[in-house]
Image (tube, helix red, strand yellow):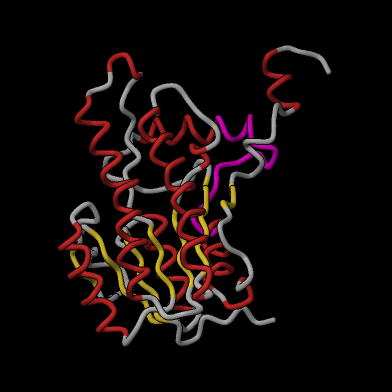
Amino acid sequence: MSFCLQGKRVVITGGARGIGLAIANAFVAQGAHVAVLDLLPMRADDAPLPYFACDVTDESTFASALDGAVARLGGLDVLINNAGVTALGGELASMEAAYFDRVVAVNQRGVMLGLKLGGQRIADGGSIINTASLAAFVHEVGTAAYNASKAAVVSLTKSAAMEFGPRQVRVNAICPGHVRVQRDDLDPEVMESLEQLCETVAPMGRVAELDDLVGVYHFLAAPESRYMTGQALIIDGGFSLGLTPLLYEKLGIGL
């Protein structure tokens, strides 16, 4: 088995930064033709990729950007609905409704529109991959809006898999745990805290690197995953498995 992406025509939303950009670079290295949709511009020092400005919450602009990308690539074999927001929003008792609406608009409505518009344009036998999150299954205080939106992504994935199955279009979700990313709005102390948390709670003892995720997207994009659909793959270094010996040790609890 080769898991070949040579010649695959791939569109990635939220592809100008973070997970999306890492996927784009990895797929291009494997011979895929990749276009990026994002509200953020591509940075000058990143490898040049076909780029289309896109707000995934607006159906008309999303459709226009996707049409531009599909025309540039000559078709669509793989769509990765990766655009999302991850900011905290406080506890429910004090959460602003406008914040909740914004998170749902990007993370949930954006994926719904990606499934609708992508489903209309993708070739039979293609693959749609949605970026969900471990937060769909493991909840933390202060992340209710994010948790709910990512749980919705998992549900939308299953519904789309049912609808698109007769065309042999598979739809799956990837649910990353905590990932080391470089973001202008991310306090370095927050990233340091997440690293320490993963060292204690994840059996693998570390936070995920971007390269830890791209291979799973590669598998789901490749034809060898052609009988896998409607699944939500958790990529968290074992974070969700339970209490580690190191956590017991730090709490002073003997095993």
Residue sitting at 24 percent across and 63 percent down? 43
Q: Left or right: where does residue 240 sit relative to residue 74?
A: right
Question: What quarter of the picture does the C terminus occupy?
Answer: top right
Would you place residue 53 above or below residue 245 in this image?
A: below
Q: Count every numbered label the image shows and give the total.
A: 0
Q: Does the magenta stretch include residue 213?
A: no
- Residue 199 x/y as whole percent: 61, 34
Q: What stretch is highlighted in magenta?
A: 197-211
Would you place residue 93 above or below residue 5 in this image?
A: above
Instruction: Locate residue 241: give its quadrant.
Output: top right
Would you place residue 129 above or below residue 1 in this image?
A: above
- Residue 17 x/y as whole percent: 33, 57
Q: Left or right: where does residue 234 sit relative to residue 92?
A: right
Q: Nearer the viewer, residue 122 or 56?
A: 122
Residue sitting at 72 percent across and 19 percent down? 248
Q: Left or right: where does residue 109 sit relative to residue 6?
A: left
Q: Nearer the viewer, residue 227 or 4?
A: 227
- Residue 178 x/y as whole percent: 50, 41
Residue sitting at 42 percent across and 43 percent down? 152
Instruction: Locate residue 79: give its quadrant.
Output: bottom left
- Residue 228 x/y as whole percent: 62, 65
Question: What quarter of the picture does the N terminus occupy?
Answer: bottom right
Q: Is residue 204 magenta?
A: yes
Magenta-drawn stretch, dominant element (helix, strand or loop): loop
